[in-house]
Image (spheres, rainbow, N blue to C red):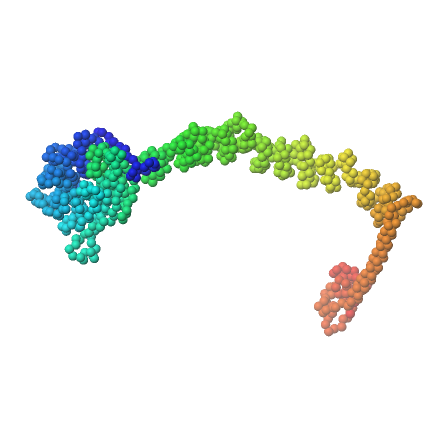
Amino acid sequence: MEKAEKLPTSSDSGAESAEEEEEVEPKFKYQRIANDLKTILNTDVVTCSSVHSKFLIFGTFRGCVYLLDHQGNSVKSNLSSSERHTHTVAVNHIDVDPKGEYVATCSDDGKVNITGLFSCENNQSLSLGKFIKSVALDPDPKTRVRRFIVGDDKLTLYERNLLKKLKPTELCSVEGNVLSICWQGNFVAWASHLGVRVYDLSEKCSLGLMKWELPPQARLENFRCHLRWSNANTLLIGWVDTIRICVIRKRNAIEASSSNLPGYVVDPVSTFQTTFYICGLAPLASSQLVVLGYRKQRSATYKALRPVLCVIEYKMNSSEEICTDSLTLRGFEEYTVNDYSLGCLIEENRYYIVAPKDIVVASLIETDDRVEWLIKHSKFEEAMDLISTHGGSLPVLTVARLYINHLLTLKQYEDAAKLCLRMLGNNKSLWEEEVFKFVKCQQLRSVSAYLPTSDECKLGSHVYEMVLYEFLKFDVNGFLNLIKEWPPQLYDGLAVINAIHDNFRKENATQLLESLALLYSYQGNYENALRMYLKLQNKDVFELIRRYELYDVISKLIIPLIQLDRDRAFKILLDKNKIKPEVVVHQLEQNQEYLFWYLDALERVDSRNVFQHKLVVLYAKYDRAKLLPFLRRSKEYVIQDALAICKREGFYPEMVYLLGCMGGVEAVEALNIIMHSIKDIEMAIEFCKEHNDNDLWTVLIEESTKQPEIVTKVLDGIVDYVNPELVVSKIKLGQTIPHLRQSIIKMLWHYNIQEEILTNSHQIQLTDYFATHSEVVTLQRRGQQVSYDLSCPQCHKSVVIKDTVPRNALIAFKCGHIYHEICVPGRLINEHHCELCKLRNTDIDRPE
């Protein structure tokens, strides 16, 4: 058996366009019928055909009728066993009963043959002596070909009676000849030279004439009228270049009230024109038709153009071409519009394009075919969507991988990587296979952001390492980002570290050192990680120390840490729980300035640390302003060593303080420093006041006599401490003392004020004393009320009984307790005391 040949087609919108448009997805797939059909058509041409679900039957120019299966193979039947069932001239029309048992044919030889394909029981042959253009068998499968209709110059119904004789009944007279017949149920549609009529067999009347517009410069009968029932009451008419869809409906009550009108009416629901001549039409879906067309245009050599198969969607009086395929049929350039016809199997959505030398089957394209076409035209997204929605034999993952290959070919690496993420899911083996495609293109960088890194789909470590090596080679910044983003367990960290050392480039030192720092951290080698950060001067080192508590590691890195960020370094170094001061001081001995910074900060948080003695020399060297306050507040240094340092540096105020602390002779030395080195008499006076030592005052007074200009200042300063007479007595006769007069006047005035203050104070004191004494005496002389409720603390009897005269005197103490005189402990007056308060009462009140 010869394999069916695929028909080359092209999709267009009618006329050839100068600009090539994007190819539209086809609606149909086409196959040319071959096998025995090919042999037949080598010697004959097809003039008419009919399609049944069981077979394909066609008539030829030579009057023969052939029965073939749908693959084009001849089927043995009564048609092939005898020439009795053929015609002498071209066959005009063929019709098949619904069961596929009988065939009706007619021809211009005037004969009508009803032939049983596999039985001769009901065969009929009529010779009418007229041109017969159309014949139709009863579509009712129960009648067993008991009726058929023939069209010549009238429409005639032939019905076989019980005696198997045919009874003709003229249904309708015709204007000209019957050109086409189509029978469905009780309705027969037929065409004449004027238009199309529908005849109602049940009511035996015509439902009216639909006149057809005459084509310009041609006659209507020169074009075949194509009739087809799409269902029991919908008629499709295609004639010349006009299509009309008609619905047979019952008249409504208002319409039926008129007399002499048929019970049914033909309603044209849509009428529209096409850009081509119609060679056949068939239903496709709701409001869609499949139309075989013959182009009105001609080629440059005045030859016919290729026929078209068009899908049209119609509305009320308009239409839209959904898709149009140009068909390359054998000999199409020589054919006319009437040489083509269209058969169909509506249930199977198959359409047969019949030409004189060719028969092609158009089938609605299936999912697999659509997917194949979409892939062929690089429409992979649409193909994947189609499979996801409608399924198919080809897995969507297979299409996705083809799509990835296509994108890589187009160098659209980023899109290919995104597609991998979307389609490969957690399939580890597929991921690794697709990644190697990126390796060949040296585009692992494009897919790196989309590689799976979770435990559910962890690829082999070599995959991630390959990506890292490519980044290391071509994109160091990207390499660093991956080291930061990827979990370290994805790859061999030591191998990557070695690769960095092997490919270290000075121009990328910053990124590579940071990468090494991260990798060393991941490996737990924190000391090397810290060294990398310190080389980078990267302050993330402090976060690393804090996170992993690397306080033992930093003991050898203290100086670099301080150089990087002194404040953050000291925040760690000053915490004794993290690192001991002894370790820090030992490391900083080699850098005295850093040691000064550290000990100065340490002294602020721990004023009793054991390293305060080192601060004397450090303050002297780096920050003298802090030295004297430190000497004053701290006692944790050797005063002699501190004095030696201050003497060496010539720090007189500090020397004065230290010598003053030592006292004795050293205090006198301090005073001499103030007088001779600092030369600040006010400071000397304050020094003497602070120590208030007679020897110091003597030295100061002696020194003042040698310097007359300071005598007055001494006189002013010694008031309240030393008798000014000592200073005055030291002044030599005739010696000139600047401002001495004013100073003495001021001193005398001061003494006068002091004497006045003392006198006034004494007077105030006396006045206050007598006033207070008077108040006390008045208070003590005041009478004390005795109530009837009071009882004697000793005998516990009422001290006073109401309405009786007291027999005994009462004694009241200042504490407020009142006794009977006889009850007071101690009989002698001067020994009376309150038993409760143990208060001896020298002043006894006798209440009245």
User: Percent x, y for residue 248?
Assistant: 20, 49
The N terminus, quarter of image: top left
The C terminus appears in which quarter of the rendering?
A: bottom right
Looking at the image, residue 351 sits to the left or right of residue 536; the answer is: left
Q: Quadrant of residue 587?
A: top right
Name the quadrant containing residue 346: top left
Q: Is residue 843 visible?
A: no
Residue ranking furthest to the top: 502
Q: Residue at x 17, y 47 (%)?
A: 197
- In the displayed orientation, state which residue is furthest to the right: 733
Q: Classify 141 as above or below 461.
A: below
Residue 538 locus on image (x, y percent): 58, 35
Toward the viewer: 657 or 396? 396
Whether residue 247 is visible here, answered yes or no, is yes
Instruction: Name, please, the residue furthest toward the bottom.
Output: 803
Residue 655: name its quadrant: top right
Most foreground residue, 840 or 145: 145
Left or right of residue 260: residue 809: right
For the point 19% across and 30% down, which residue is it?
A: 42
Q: Residue at x 56, y 28 (%)?
A: 506
Residue 467 at x, y = what percent? 47, 30
- Residue at left 10%, top 41%? 130
Q: Percent position (x, y) of residue 193?
A: 17, 45
Q: Residue furthest left?
A: 163
- Indicate left or right for 772 with 126 as reference: right
